[in-house]
Image (cartoon, rainbow, N blue to C red):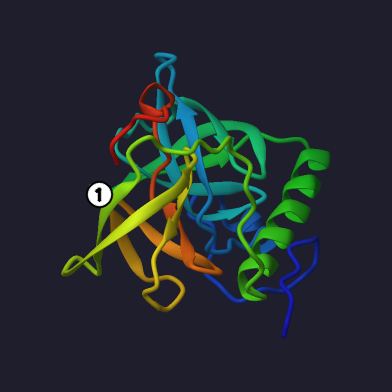
Amino acid sequence: MIAVDLTAGAELRGVPDPARGASDERRHQRVRIAVLGRYMLADRREYPCRTVDMSPGGVRLACAVRGEVGERVVLYLEYIGRIEGVIARTCADGFAVQLNATPRKRDKLASQLTWLANREMLGLPEGRSHERLVPTQPAVVLRVDGTQEIKARLIDISMSGVAIACPLSLPLGTAVTVGSTPGRLVRYFEGGFGVQFLLPLSPDRFHAGMTL
């Protein structure tokens, strides 16, 4: 398998970063990576988000609340940590951010993105960076691809995903709605599978008695 390299001078198939100028597009190639996180706009309110694609110079987010072009935004992304920038443009499902980072920080981002992209290409298991709780109400109904309904049992829940006991065999990447929470199947284990939510749960919703 071919590994992705986002370090300086590396070539990567893709499209130019929408949040950078022409010269930066040649230096920073974006990759499609779905990472969960949260963002804070200028009013200091936080909202959940998911990355659509990212480079060391910019990131495009899928989110419900869009800021204004030129507005400062602070991001907290899984596996990456805290980064910040300004909104470069808005789109139907979110917005693109031009990142403010030193050359050293961009080199670190390049290494992190290389690891994330290669993990997805090589089919490595998802990390578990969030606290996980055992639910007090484990029974749940799954909807697969928006049609088929299946009864299953929740094993544990985090703000970014859930482990489910279910004998059903589905392809990795299948769209699965857990209760009313949409996600995608990201890994298998004996007796079940893991689903990553499309957007992380809010901390105020996250407790053992919650209903998905």
Q: Quadrant of the C terminus?
A: top left
Mark yes or no: residue 208 visible: yes
Identify which residue, 202 or 75, lies in the foreground.
202
- Residue at 80% over, 48% down: 107
| Quarter of the view holding residue 205 | top left
Q: Residue furthest left?
A: 147
Identify which residue, 143 or 15, lies in the foreground.
143
- Residue at 39% over, 14% down: 43
Identify which residue, 87 or 157, lies in the foreground.
157
Q: How many labels, in total?
A: 1
Q: Residue furthest bottom?
A: 1
| Quarter of the view holding residue 175 | bottom left
- Residue at 44% over, 17% down: 42
* Three-letter code, disc 1: Gly
Q: Is residue 11 left or right of residue 186?
A: right
Q: Which residue is mark 1?
A: 179
